[in-house]
Image: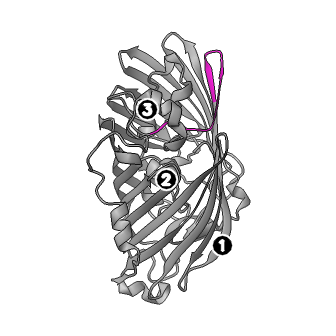
Amino acid sequence: MKMTFKTGIALAALIGSPAMAQHEGHGGHQMPAEEATQQHNHGTHQMESGNLCLPVATVPAWANGSGTSRLPGSEGTLGGCGQPASAHAPGGLHAMSGDWMLMAHGYVWPVYTDQSGPRGDDKIYAQSMVMLSASGPIGEGVNLELRTMLSAEPLMDNAGYPNLFATGETDEGEPLVDRQHPHDLFMELAARVNVDIGGSNQLFLYGGPVAEPALGPSAFMHRGSATYNPEAPITHHWFDSTHITYGVVTAGYSSSRFQLEASAFRGREPDEERWGIETPRLDSWSIRGTWNASRNWATQLSYGRINEPEALHPGEDEGRFTASVHYSGWNGLSAMAAFSAKNRIPGPTLEAFLIEANWNIDNHHTVFGRFENVENDELFDHDSPLHEIPYRISKFQAGYAYRLPLADNLNVALGGTVSAFAFPNALEAAYGDNPMGFTLFARFALGR
């Protein structure tokens, strides 16, 4: 194995076991709702397709539980977006119009990356996202949520940005390797209806032309454990690649600690035309269960049968199993550990592991890290004799961000990351002895 991890010791400290002593911390991840109201800008924003997190400061009385969108700070209830209940409420702009709540949140994230080695590249690019929602009652015990997420990343060329050992989707009909593809203009265009059926129990129906099925953990850009990490995981297509899906219908049941949901959705990944909305169809299915053992912990298990997800693998379906454990608490710490098994049908089963953490030390300083280990058989072109040979890759990443308020609800985080890799000696000819990844970034955010 080739191994380069100068930051290994620091990263191990960052993403070590989150099972630490739990206590009331100044980071704001375990505090009463009234304190969270005053300090919501210090916490972690979470907003996932299908799981809208409502801000404590402006949640109307009827919204004491909407699917997974339980009030942060509500003891024993599901946290927003499948996160622990102690995960923080979002910042951003909020307004009330009668019984309806309107919310806006987003960011623009300029990044410079330099990935070394024969397959490396450097680039200046910008990630971006804006999230808009409107929530309100439409009957006794029934409320409606309307949501959209948009991104300007289609302005980036389809080759995306350099990200060593990342694979998935295409550019001009060729597979993207060692790069991360940009997001589509429409990341979500969906609605959710929640129906109270007594106590903390609810039934819900979610879906739309652009939505996320009940499969996997929260997408990486919405996880508290990855708030300031500017790079997509190299395991993205093992865990959360379905977060932009054209055509989703999800039905589910939710209680104070448990949620069960099932989806029908389109299996094919988004194509290279990233400005439009592709034709929805329901040719795949998934099921997911979420359990909160306490307000600091959330666990999900999910399985999906995905119809021909990749354009370059026609006739090949996928059975995807994922399991993840999320933690939020101890003095501003958010962490996640996850496992995925991607079964090509027909074909091999490829496994992936992911551990990541984000620690808001105080109001200004954040350290974060990620460890990934994945079996990948798409590192070489289809005409290469090395194509479809699975190689086990490990990525070690550590980062730091310094956060500054710019105005009400507007802040910037300045920081950077360093990454190192471990891989089989057979890949040395392609990747070199010691490839490294470096980034510098300035994340301008409305809210968090």
Q: CA distance from mark 2 to mark 3?
A: 20 Å
Quarter of the figure that contains the N terminus? bottom left
Q: CA distance from mark 2 to mark 1?
A: 21 Å
Identify the amino acid type marked 3. Answer: Pro
Q: Is residue 260 left or right of 414 when viewed as pictured? A: left
Q: Which residue is mark 2?
A: 220
Query: Which residue appears at 48% of the width and 22% of the height?
Result: 194
State the SS at label 3.
Answer: loop
User: Going from the N terminus, do you reach mark 2 or mark 1 first?
Assistant: 1
Residue 229 falls left or right of residue 30: right
Which residues make up the magenta segment?
A: 88-102
Magenta stretch: includes residue 97: yes
* Residue matched to label 3: 72
Q: Earlier in the sequence, mark 3 or mark 1?
A: 3
Amino acid carrying label 2: it is Phe
C-alpha separation, residue under disc 3 versus residue under disc 1 = 38 Å
Q: Nearer the viewer, residue 28 or 117?
A: 28
